[in-house]
Amino acid sequence: MANYLPTPVKWVRDQVELYEGSGGTKGLTLLDTGLPCIIVTHTGNKTGAIRKTPLMRVKDGDNYVLIGSKGGAPKNPVWVHNLRANANVEIRDATEVSKMRVREVEDTAERERVWGLAVKAFPPYEEYQSKTSRTIPVFVAEPD
Ligand code: F42
């Protein structure tokens, strides 16, 4: 059984601990925005460790849209490499935990559609994309 390696980013690690430790009843929103988050549990592509990453909750029917924004940083978040290497994840959405499979969105029309959903759920994504020359990676997570 792989071990859980928490992120070194304290505020994020603390949110994961509050969210999961409360069984998905506390720590559900991004800081003081009041906007809902999910927790994606995935596998480290180098360590094989269990990694947990909070992301904004962007629904598309039964699917979730995962946005590799990292606040518009110049480089992709490393969880993107993990999802590219292993599509099997678990998504915790409040008290619900579901096994999902992720796929990176390559098709332009699909990307436009799901990007629209993401920006509606969390408007800062638009600004993050304008801040960086990299194309922010977009994944869709579908129930396994
Ligand atoms: N980040 C987003 O990109 N999008 C969001 O919508 C988003 C929302 C959000 C809401 C709440 C919250 O608390 C955080 C939120 N974040 C969001 C931030 C997100 O949770 C991540 O902190 C951020 O995206 C950066 O992800 P990261 O995977 O780059 O994290 C780094 C800091 C990290 O944890 N690095 C570890 C380390 O030790 O430095 C390694 C992690 C890892 O996965 N290692 C892999 C392994 O094998 O274990 C190897 C990875 C590789 O290939 O190098």
Image (cartoon, rainbow, N blue to C red):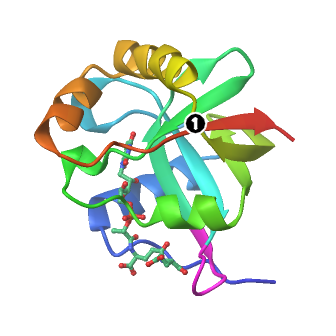
User: Image height check: is 92 above or below 119?
Assistant: below
Coordinates of residue 123 in the picture (x, y in percent): 27, 19
Quarter of the figure with residue 103: top right
Q: Residue furthest left?
A: 131
Q: Residue furthest right?
A: 144
Residue sitting at 57 percent across and 29 percent down? Answer: 107
User: Image height check: is 19 above or below 86?
Assistant: above
Q: Main secondary structure of the magenta part?
A: loop
Q: Residue furthest front?
A: 108
Q: Quadrant of ligand 1?
A: bottom left
Taking the image as shown, residue 109 lies to the left or right of residue 120, namely right
Q: In the rendered structure, which segment of residues is drawn in magenta?
A: 44-51
Taking the image as shown, residue 40 lies to the left or right of residue 35, namely right
Looking at the picture, tell me which residue is in the foreground, 119 or 13: 119
Q: Is residue 48 magenta?
A: yes
Taking the image as shown, residue 77 lies to the left or right of residue 75, namely right
Residue that label 1 marks: 105
Residue sitting at 23 percent across and 45 percent down? Answer: 71
Residue 56 in view in this figure: yes
On the rendered image, what quadrant is the C terminus found in? top right
Task: Name the residue type under label 1.
Answer: Val
Q: Secondary structure at mark 1?
A: loop
Taking the image as shown, residue 2 lies to the left or right of residue 139, namely right
Coordinates of residue 20 in the picture (x, y in percent): 59, 52
Residue 27 in view in this figure: no
Classify mark 1: residues with Cα within 10 Å, few (<14), some (14-19) or many (20+).
some
Residue sitting at 12 percent across and 40 percent down? Answer: 131
Q: Is residue 122 magenta?
A: no
Coordinates of residue 93 in the picture (x, y in percent): 63, 34
Coordinates of residue 2 in the picture (x, y in percent): 74, 83
